[in-house]
Structure formats: C-alpha cells, structure tokens
Image (tube, coloured by chain):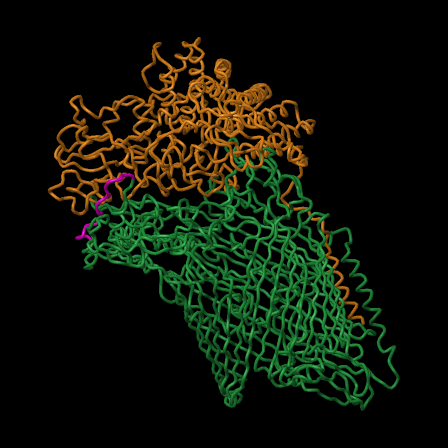
Amino acid sequence: MKKKFTLRQGGNRFAPVLQPPSGLIIFLLFIISLPVMAQRPAATAIRSAVPVSGRITNEKGEPLAGASVKVKKSKGGRSTDSSGRFTLMARTGDELEISYVGFTQTRYIVNDQSRGINLVLKALPGSGKLDDVIVVGYGTQKKANVLGSVSVVKAEDLVVTKNENVVNMLTGKVPGLRIQQMSSEPGSFNTQYDIRGFGSNPLGNPTPPLIIIDGVPRSSGDLSRLDPNEIDNVSVLKDASAAIYGVKAANGVVLVTTKRGGRTNGKFNITYSVNQSWQQFLNVPQGIDAAGYMELYNEALKTNFGTNATTTAPPSFSDSTIALYKSGQLKSTNWMKAITRPLAPETQHNLSMSGGSDKVNYFFDLGYLTQGSLFKTNSINYNRWNFRSNVNINFTKRLRGAANISGYTDTKNAPNQSVWVIFKYAENLLPTDPIYANNNPLYPHLEPDNDNPIVMTNSDLIGQNIFKNKNIQGQLSLEYDIPGIPGLMAKGMYNYGYNVTDNTIVSKAYNLYTYDATTDTYPVTTAHSPSTVQRQYYTNTNTLMQLSLNYHHQFGGAHNVTALALYEESQSSGDNFSAQESFSLGIPYLFAGNAGDANYLQVGQDGNALVNQVTKSYIGRFDYDYKGRYLAEFSFREDASSKFSPIARWGFFPGGLIGWRISNEPFMQKLISPSVLNNLKFRASYGKLGDDQFNLYQWVSGYNYPAPGAVLNGSYVNGVSSRGIPDLGLSWVNSKTFNVGADFDLFNGLIGGSVEYFNRTRTGLPAYPNAQIPGTSGLQVLEANLNADVTKGIEVTLTHHQTIHQVSYNISGNIGFSRIKRGFTEETRAASAYDQYQGLQNLNVINGSSQGNLQVNGSQSGRYSNIWWGYLYGGQFSSYNQIYNYNVNTGGGNQAVLPGNYYYQDINHDGVIDDKDKVPLATRDLPMVNFGMTLSAAYKNFDASVLLQGATDFHIQYAEQLATPLMYQRSALSEFINRWHPADPNANLFDPNTQWVPGTYSATGTPIADGSKAVQNATYMRVKSLEIGYTLPKKVLNRIGIQNVRVYVNSYNLATITGLKNSDPEHPGTVATGQDFNVSQAGYLYPMNRTFSCGASVSF
Amino acid sequence: MKKVKYISLILAVIIIGSCHKLDVPPLSIISESQVFSTANGIQAYLANMYTFLPMEDFVYEPDKGFLTGDGGRWQNFYQMDAIDGEMAGPYGGVGDAAQGFGLWPYDRIRNINVLLYSLPKYASNYTQDQVNEWLGEAYFCRAYTYFALVKRYGGVPIVRTVIDPNATTASLQVPRNTEEDVYNFIGSDLDSAYNLMWEPGAGGHPAIQQGAASKYAAMAYKSRVMLFAGSIAKYGAVNYVDGDARAKGFAGGIPAGDATKFFQAAYDAAKLVEGHFSLYTGGYPDKVQNYVDVFMKPNNEQIFIRQYSLSDPQRNNDNSGPHSYDATMTCRYMTADGLSRTYPSLDYVERFGPLPIVNTDGTPTRFSDRADLMNSLEPRLLATIYFPGSTLRGLTFDVQRGIYKTFNGSAAQELSNNLNTPNDVNTNWPDTTDPGKNLLFAANSNQLYRGRRIVGLAGWNPSTGDDNTRTGLYLRKYVDYAKQQSACGLYQSAQSYIDMRYAEVLLNRAEAAFELGTLQADALGDINQLRDRAGAAPATASMTIDTIRNERCKELGFEHQYWWDIRRWRTADQVLDNRKIYALLPYYIATENKYIFLKQVEPFQRTYTFQKKWYYEPLPGGELSRNPNLFPNNPGY
C-alpha cells in the first residue's frame, strides 16, 4: 500500500491543472464502466452449462495467446487472451479440445471441479519458433502471425555476449540493426546505432531508434545501462509495425520487456551469477622511440624549404646523438607505456529471485557492475547498481495487477581532462622529452600546452570529475476482464520516472617543471589555474498514463479478431542548475570556495534543459486472421505534442499490414506436406510515421532569454534575442515506410529464415528556406519542413537447427543492407557545372554572414548521402626517372617530389592534379552492410556458442597523429618508421643518384596519403563473442539443495579479420567533411577492448 | 467489488493528476511586451545589441570575422595587425584576409530597427529621457554597423525599416546605395544619437556606462567615419581600379569636391568631444608606466570600450567571455598556458627613428646588456614594445638568436655574407663546440656554450617555429603586467578592449584640420598634446601630413587602425609592394662578452603585397546570387 500512496502523491503534484482535458473524460467513462460491467456476471448463463475458465501455457509456463479452446463437436469456441486465459460455457463431461499452431492438440474432460484449469501444451518438435509469443507495439503476437518486420532477441541469446552495455550485446543479432562501438571507455557508452540506417546523420552521431522499456519511452542511455539479467526479450520493430508509436517512431522502435516470475507453485528460485573479466586493449597507438623520431625529424628537415627556394636545413640531430639512443646510453620516453596498463578488470554480480503461485508471482533482481580503465592510475572507472522488482497479482479471477519498480544508480569517475587530449599527447609528445624534470619523480616535466599525460591521468593532481546518474521507474497496471463480453479486457497503466544527473567537476591547478642545469633549479609553471569546483544538477520527471480496451475473440472457429483502443498521455519536465566556485584551501566544495572571487563564481541554468512537455495520443489496432491463412492488421495513432503549434499539433499515423500464410492453405498442404513445409508466409506493410526530434517551439514568437549579453559597467547583463519570424506550420518529419517479406520454415526447423525488402521515404526534413531570401531582409529565417530522402535496403535471415545423436546445434545468420538517397534538398545554385557534378552545395546558409556555409559532397537533391569524394590513388613513385618522366603536375611542377611519394590519377587529363580530379571513392558513415552469425551447440553438459559479426561497404580515414608523422612539430607513431628514406641518412634527397630504401609510407615531411590511398576499406569480421559453458551434474547438486550450477569462459572481440592496419575498424578515424569533431575526436577516442571472462551462475 | 472500486479510486487520483493541457508554454521564451515594457528588458535588448557590434576587438580575425563563443576565440594572435606587416604573424601575407570574410550583418541591423520601431509603442512606461537615450544608443549601433560595411564594400543597401517577412522576394531585394549615401546616412544616425542621448552625469543622469555608448562616443565615432569618407573622397580620386561599381558611385567615385565637407564634419565632431574626455596622465612621473596604464586602468581617455567577464554565463555564444591575450601575446614561460604567434615588426619601431644599433663606421654597436638598447628610446615606444632584456612578472625576455665566438667587421657585411638566408644557419647540436664554426645556433635553449645558453629562452630557433619571437620583440600594449604567471591561461584575460580613446579623436581632429588646410595650428596643438604625454619632443610648425600620419601610426600602433588607415589613404598598394618585414635579433659575442643587434629580414621571410582592387572587398557571393540588385560587384571581382 505504501507504494500506491507514493504514486498518489506523485499524482497530486499535478492536481492544480484546471481544465479537465479529454483524457479525464475518457477515464471517467472507464471507471464508470468498471462497476457496471462487474455487476453483470453469469446473468446470461445457459442453464445446465457452467462457466469453465483456465489458462493455457507452454512447457515453460509462458501463456499462449490465441490458442483455440472449444467443446468437442460443437461449433464456435474461444481463443485465449494475451495472458493465455479463456472462459467458456461447458457441461460436466464435455470434452475440451485445445489446439494451437505448432503444438500437439490436447483434450480435457470437464468435471465438477473444473475451475481454474491449467493446461500445458507440448510443442511439436521443430516448430518451436512459430509459437513464440513476441512483443509488438502495445501487445504481443504469435510469431506465426506477425506481419511486420520484427526481430526478436531472447534473454538466452542476449547474454551470450558479455559487455557492460546492453546495446553492444545486441551486435550481430538483429538484421538491420547497425551497431558500431566507438570506444570501450568505461561509463561513456559510446556506441552508435540505428535501425536500417534510419537514424543516419552524415554530420554527427546517428539518431537511435525509439526505446521502449516495459511500455515506457526511455532514453538510449537507459537502455545501455540496463542489467542484462533483467531482460526477458528485445523486439526490434523496423517497418509499419512501428507506426503504432506514431510521431516518434520514424527511426524504428526497440521494445525491451523485462523478466517476470513464473508459476512455480509457491517455490522460489534464487540465482546468483558472477562474471569476472579482464579487458585487453586493441590497437593502442604507440609512439616512436627517440632514435626513430630523430631520424624522421632530420629527414623532414631535408624536405622543408620553408620560404627559401634553394636550400634546406641541415639535420637537427647528429648521428652521434642518435647513436646514444640506439645504444641505450640515453633512454627514450614511452609516453603511452607510462600511463597505460595491459589489462584492466571488470566485474559483474547479479542476484535474482523469482517465483509465483496462482495469486502472485514476482521477479527481483539486483545487479552490480564495476569497470576499470587502461590507465595505470585507473582514474577512469565506472560502477553501477541496478534494481528491479516486478510483481504480478491476481486479485480476483477478473482483476489482475502488476507493480514494477526498477532503477539504477551509476558513477563514472574521470580525471579533469578529456580522454582525447590525454591520448593526443600520449601519442605526440617527443620521446626525447623526459616525463619528469631531471628524471626526478617529484617534478612532472613541462610539456607543450601543459599537457603531461602523467599529470592528466592523475585525478589527484588535475582534479576529478564525478558523473552520477540515478534513475527510478515505478509502474502500476491493472487489467480487468470485463464480464459479459468474452475477450474484452480493460487495462490501465501509470508509470512515473525520475532521473537525476549529479555531476561534480573539480579542476585543480598543478605545477610543471623544467630543469635548469646552469643553476640546478626547477623553474615552475603553474597551469590549470585557478582550482575550481563545479556542481551540475539535472532532474527530469516523466509520467505516462495508458488506458486501453483490448478485445480478442474467435468467431466461427475461423475468424480471429483482436482489437485495441488506447489512450496515452505523457508529461515530462526537466530542471537544472549549476554552480561553480574557485577554491584554494584544498577542499573542493562550494562552501569552501574563495569568498568574493567573483571571477570564477558562476551560477547557471541551462535554458534548453528546462523542459515541460505534454503529449497525448489515441491509438488503435485491429487484427484479423482467417484460419491463420489470411492475416491483416491495421493500426493508427493520433498524436499531439505541446512542442508544435496548435495548428500543426495533431498528426495521424496509420499503418496497414497484410499477410498470406500459404503453408496453411489446404491446396498447399496437399502439394507439400506440412511436415516438410512447416511455414511459408508472405507479408507486406505500409505505414506513416513521424520524427519530432527537431527544433522545439519554432512556432512561438518572442524572445529567447537569457541570450547572449554584454558586460556593462563591469557586470554581465543577460541579453534577449529575437526568435525571428515564427513558423506556425513547422511540424514533424513524415516518414512513409514500405516493407515486403517472406518467412519460411522447413523440415521442422532444419532450415528457416526470412527475406525483407524495405523502402522508406521521408518528407519534411527541416531546412532553412533562405536560399532565395536576400540577407538584407535581416530575417532570421527559421527552419521549415522542406527536404526529403529515401532509404532502401534488404535483409536476409537464415536459421538451421539439428540434433545429431547427443549434439544439438543452431546456426543463425543475418545480413542487412541499407542506403540513403536525398530527395528534394533546399540548396543554393552551384557555382559551376563541376560543383554541380560534385554535389558541392551550401547545406545551410547561416544568416548574417556567408561564413559558416557547410559544403558537403552529395548534399544535393537526388544524391546518395554517404559518398566520399577524393583523388583516385595512382601509386608511389619508385625512382627519380619515373618522376622526371611524369607529365602530370602534382603541385609545384613536381620540383619537390621524391621517390616514395604518392601520385593520383589525373581524371580530367588536364595535366594538373586539383579539385577537379576528385571522384566518388567510397561510402562514409556507418557500414552499409552488416552481418552476424551465431553458432551454438550443446553436448551433454557442455554448451558453446560463437557470434561472428562484421560489416562491409565501410570506410574510414585516419586523422591527425594516425595519419601524419611529426604533426604539430611533435613526434610520430611507431609505424611511420616504415617509410621511404635514403639509404645514406646524410644524402641529398634531390640528388638523382641517391639510393632509396622503400617503405609503406612516403618520405617524412612529404605529403601524407590522400584520396583513395587514405580512405581505407574497413571491412571486417570478428569473433564478437565466444562462450563455452559446463553445467554441473544435477544429481550431485540436488542433494545439497542446489538446482543448477553453470560455469563458463567467455571472450568479447576475441579475434578480428580485417585489412585495416594500425586501428580497430570500429574505432573511428575521421569521417569526411563537416562531421562533428566529437564523433571521432580526430581518432583520439579511448581504444576498443577485448575481454576474457570467466563466470558462474548458481540457482537454488 | 469493493476492492475494484477502491483500486479504481486510486487509479482515478493518479490519472486525474496526470491530465495535462497541451498548451504548455516553453519556459525560456518571453514575449515582445515583456521585453519592451520594462527597463530591464530594454537593457537586455541593448546588451544583446552591444555584444554583437562588429567591433574589431582582441578576438577579431580579419579572415574569419567577429568571433563569438569559444572555438578559435583564444587565438588572439590572429589579430589584424599581422596582415599588414605591422606585426609578423600567422598570416602568409595580405591576401589571406584582403578579400574579407563575407560580413553581412543585416540581421543585427534588423534587430536595431526593431528597437527603433517598437520602443515608441511602449514609451508611456518610461520618461522621455529614457526613451531618447535608448533610441540614441540604437542609432549609434546602427551607424557603427553600417561603417563596418561601408569601409569594406563601399555602398551597401540602406535598410531603415523592419522589413515585412511576407513581402515579395522582389521587394526584399533591396538595391545598393552609393558609398556617399551610406556615409551621409551614418553621419545623420550619429547626429541623431548625439541629439537624443542625455548629458552624462548632468541633470541627475548617471555618468557614462562603461561598455555602452554615450553621446560623445557618437561624436568620437563620427570623427572616425567622416575622416574615412573625406580621405576616400580626396585620395580615391587618384588611385583606383575602374569599373561599373565605381562609375555608379558604389565603390569609390565620391566627388573629390566633397572631401572638404567630410573633413569639416570630422573636425566638428572631434571638437565636440573636447572637454568631456582627456588624455590619461594619471599623475605619474614615469611616462612609460603612465602610457602602459592607458590600456590597463579605467580612465577618462577611454570613450568606448568592450568589457569582458570571466564568469560570463553565455561565453560560448557572446562576445563578453574572457579572451586569452595574456596567454598568447608573450613568452610561453611567462604564462600558464597558450602560445604566441605574432610579434611587432622592427618596421613599427623604426617609425620612431632608427635604432642605435650600428656605429658610424658600420660595425654593430656593442652592448654590455641587451636592455641597454632601451636607454635612449621614447617612453611611448617602451610602453608599446617589450624589447630584449626587458622584464615582466619577474622574468626577463631572454631573446638571443645565437652566439658569435668572435665578431669582426660590419653589420652589413655579416648580413650579406651569412645571414641572408636565416633558415640555412641551423647548427647540429651537440656539435656546436665544433672549432670550425664561429656562429653558433641551437635547436633548443638547453644547449650551452661555455655554460651560457646559445639561444635565449625566448628564441628564436627553428624547432620552436612560431612559438618564440621571430622579430626579437614582444608586444607590451594591453599585456596585463599585474597578472601572475599562473593566471595567464587561455580564457583567463578580461582586460577591456578600447575601441575609441581620446588620443584617436585628437589624431582624427589633427588630420581633418590639416586636410582642410585652414586649421594647421589646431592640428599642431593636437599632435603636441600627444607628444607631450608620450614623452617625445614636440612637433614644429613645419610638420606635414606625413608627420600627422606617422604620429597616428605610432600612437595607435597595434590597435587595428593601420590597416584601415593605409586603405583610406590609398597608400596600401605602395606601402605593401612586395615588402618584407624586419626583425631585431640579438647575438652574444663570446670573446667580447657583449651583445650586438642585427637588423634582419624576419626569419619566415613573408612577403606583403596589396593589390589595388583590395581597397574594396567583393560583395558576398551568396548575397549576390539572392539579390540581383547588388550588382555590379566591386571593380576587379
């Protein structure tokens, strides 16, 4: 009762709302109807027949919805509802026939005690998958009846991959789900993903799909932070089956359903599991040693004319100095090794309890994760607690309730420096520089930009950032079988979610030193000053209410009808503030700040995170099938959001799906025995969806406050800025999705699979319509729904199941392809026909200045959006003669070209390599083709599974230090030693008699790789996960009260096959023009990891 | 059934509580009447207007424009004095920035017009004085913005009204006005500003608000604008690239006869400022320190300034966040962070006369201490430049290019023999003790020759590239000498940028007076006020226009004026004709234990050339394509 009281208080917060909106009226109808309906039981009973009710489950105790129950030799009958329940009228002695596709038919003879019959249907061998109940939007469906493009990952398939991020655990398991893990930085959850490329964004991270956890829209971060042991299954809706989620569903929907207790007749089950992993880091770039650096530096000088056309500088480092390092008399500094360790631990614990009876069932889960980093100091680390309690209660025969409470709290600690800065300097600082001045560990050496990695990875010196999240969700739902109308059920659900982000950012001043040998002193530089502490506090509250009527009935034993009417309302509000103060007494708290230091005292609030939004939706769905052969589904959603203006607020999003299960046709069954062709279904879907994640409140005129302001008389005055001309019509993006597919199952599971084709058209993508409006108008033109694009692709899934003697095994493979083409695109005129060809257009012209135009190849109507342009690589010059005879000017009349330099194809044959020689080279952004294959097998007590995963049509280019030796006049990575260089280090490089030693890279100081030489094919396939388990013999265990013990070893990212060198294919380099720096952070992201784990789970 | 009702009731409470209206106003948006009905709202409106004034402040970059937010804003060394050779800096030459960056701030002009149009509707909430003051500030800001346009493009469209968004595209295509029209328009806006704004400190009105404009700022600004217009009228008639735009009066083509009108207006405006602002003398006997403090301490010379705040909450969006001047304009070892890239040229120093570094016999003058060079220099020059051997924050500017074991002969001989290709003279270390070498260089300052650094901590050596001075000099103007090393980090400087100070008004007045040809005595008086404060010898009645111009270059050096001055004088194409700029590099002579200074071409040997067509920038291409009425483009484009 306490919990209910809490929720009621939560409700009262919003009581002052005055006008009863439509939701209230619906609710009133709803509650009035409850008692009325409740008073009508048995009034229509047939004499001598009594109501018989029961529940049909499979062998696992899971309810079977839509099973047919009828009295033998009678007509009609009933179907079970979504919880497997049925009620019908029968006389004592009647024989009930219960049938369900894929299961053996079962009979039951009604007797006097026939109340609450529980029947378990046995699955027909091999047809296991077809009867699975899978979660779709606002309900469940039998897999055999699913008409949309829906992929499901079940708990047991999910946890085969061991990772701290649930999204990474989905990699390779869902066709069409594109997942790229960018780094394994603890607590950053830096994994990009989208469904079928729908979220693709050439300039930044892709937009993830809508995430629904137990019926509630949640953030992508919440999905990442789930404890995988809480998850029962994950459904991915990729087509019009997502239309029921309306304005938020254009990028697809991921539905996560958590576990619930089974019926265990009062027994309970406790499972404890532990997983201990060791993370090993993949492709950590290594700096070159001092001798190598000096050689490269001297060579670079030889090619550097500066502004002087005749001579180059002599070497800076003499042979004798280089020899000192080569012989070991002087030691080089290995900056990366100084701060990193080869292995870092990661541990997960999980305790769950579940059980149930006729009245109550429950599932409790407690999880803990801790992950360390590759820094020796472990200054980046992460830990998380997850909690869940899912309880179902049957109050009466008709009334059921469920209460779910879940939450997590996590903490990420990190030093007060960005990871990319740490890696950048660990990669580029000179190996001739000492870590400590005069090698005295008390004095960290002064390095360029004050960025000494040994200090940057030490939170005690540089300060610590603590990022905390706390999230709690409480959900209450009630279901009531309305008497009098069999199959009609009313349901209400209310969810309250609360999230707190609480960050502490401590920045400390630290000292760096040099050593002055003339005086034996350590001159000091104080950096990162003054010490400051900042607190940031964000709170978000989300409420969701759903009221629905569900109806399921079978008419005439052949017409199955399911219908849903639902009203949904949500409200979200967000608040925040931050405060900062400088401190000098060493205590990093606001109260201990330097009093009166107004320079660093800041109190702030993020106006964009002040949120108050309401949505309302009317949702309906109607399913029909005739004997499981002809299937149809229609859904709609009428959505409104306070984000949009009253005139453009309501949107209607219908979806229609049809299917023909030809394998159920009598003629087909005559043609091919059903034992051979278990299932063959053709299906098609079409629907309209929306995407409302674009600019808020453009319809509201007025002024933004606070806006940029000025300091007047020494103190800051907040400004106001005009919002420009409001666009009342600005609305969501419309997305129309079409999908056709076929599913088939042969030889009782020996071969199965599905094939899909999809085509999604989006219109109304926001863009600035100012290609025509002169700037003199001064109009701050707001975005309008202008642009369009089309995404097309295919997906194929194949499965194979076989048992040979005592070995049973499964193979399941999937592959997905998708590509986006621009439709209409608001654009300025191309400056030339050639620009037109290259598709070089100004994407958005920023008002007020022609600066800031973003030119991205292919940003033009009718172009593929992911084309990478550049020069076509020709080869490397191998001799002076080849250079002299080369009749194409690669720049500067080839005066400075050396053997080993790259040359490119002169596409237009004008004798000069310039922009006009650029051609489409490759595809950019996330991979176009993704594939995965799971192999699993069991023999006696052993089980094993392997997940192979990969991608192709995938390209990357290295940036900064990974591409350019001696960048910013600093050091190089070790691979650059493999370069063209003169056999005699003192030779004149421009003397045609100089002998060269070939290498992979061109001579240091000459142009780095460009075009198709630099853009590399990152196609890869990797053993994403491998697990081998052993279940201890039960006979022994049961004696000591243990039900089950399984131990396993597991590896994540065990092996990778790729042509790419020096980097992990998923770890991003740079992606072409215009991309947000933070996507790849110039290649300095925290590396990927490989883990080796062992673990055990024990059930009592 | 009771249970059902009971549960329903609970559900009812929950659900009634969760019923919400869809009309939820966004939380950070306020209405026009909220803005215009309160003095605080107007103040906020003006604050937004001021922060986006196109002021060429510390962070302005001539090839990128008026930077706001973080981003490149820390790179103060991209300052515009490096494109014309007043400094040796990060630009490759004049061309990097001469064609502008597409400035087209009509959105800001619209904002100003909105205030001019809307404020009168709310006038009843205020006193007439208040309304007039605010309107006056708006006129000032509009004039300010138009001058930023006209000095770049010549004539541009004049927009005085708030353009209706629903008007036809054709009517939105406002045609170009002539250059002279725009100057007249700016003049009349500044007159309006002057007439409307109250007398600071008088009649109960507050004194001048630092960071905002006053009526005298309007007149000071008018003296700058009118002098600019007068110069173009006079000199644009003799040195130009011809074209349609000139013929139509859009770019050049102001009748030479109108020069007098503009010079007179400049003079009159400057005269109005007299008595309200003055040259800062602060009472120091030390003229160097006094001149330094003109820029470091609030004082009555500063007419219009931009202030900064370390705690600016909008620092990522506006122009008031801290800058990085102290971190980027001096030696790395005197700062907590940052790096320098731009250094005063010896050419600037020589505006004060040649330095005493060569004896009459042509041998380099010997100095026991590098700092001794400064003994004979003008206080104003010492306050503007840090010479080798001067000190800041207790540390010495340790500039030393190399060591001569011995030095015989003349400076000219040495320069032609050995130092004509500075990149060439890079010596191996630790082979610097090679007995065969007389001139020693080193790749870093840790290399010693007989216990003495071969290159100073402040270089220059090739391996540190631009991080140490290329010219031997560092800028002193605006550097906060009172700040500790640890506080000189990126985004930790907040000294105000002085956009207009009284010294400029005097120079505007002197130049206008001299150009008028009738007020030479007035001009001489103005110049000598400046010379007196600078610690320089007074000018005489024999002074010429070049005396005034040189005085202007000395006084306003590194204040982003020189670029516009040589453009309006139409001398840029002659001053910057294949020009290289010079450095003052100290060397130590080991056998003599003395220092010499050599005047060398700065080591990067950048060449500065100004094409005549660059007297006007091309109109932004995107705007031409949207508005055919902007044609013809300026001559040469």
Q: Is residue A962 magenta?
A: no
Left-right relation of A828 to A16: left
Q: Which residues are magenta?
A: A307-321
Left-right relation of B417 to B170: left
B197 relative to A952, above or below: above
The spot of residue A729 in percent (x, y) is: 69, 46
Chain A takes which shade in the image? green
Q: Which image quadrant for residue B190?
A: top right
The foreground one among A278 and A976 is A976
The foreground one among A683 and A735 is A683
The foreground one among A553 and B387 is A553
Check the picture and name the quadrant holding the N terminus of chain B.
Answer: bottom right
Question: Can I make out residue A1068 in this image?
Answer: yes
The spot of residue A384 in percent (x, y) is: 51, 64
Left-right relation of B155 to B457: right
A471 relative to A1073, above or below: below
Left-right relation of B486 to A540: left
Chain B takes which shade in the image? orange
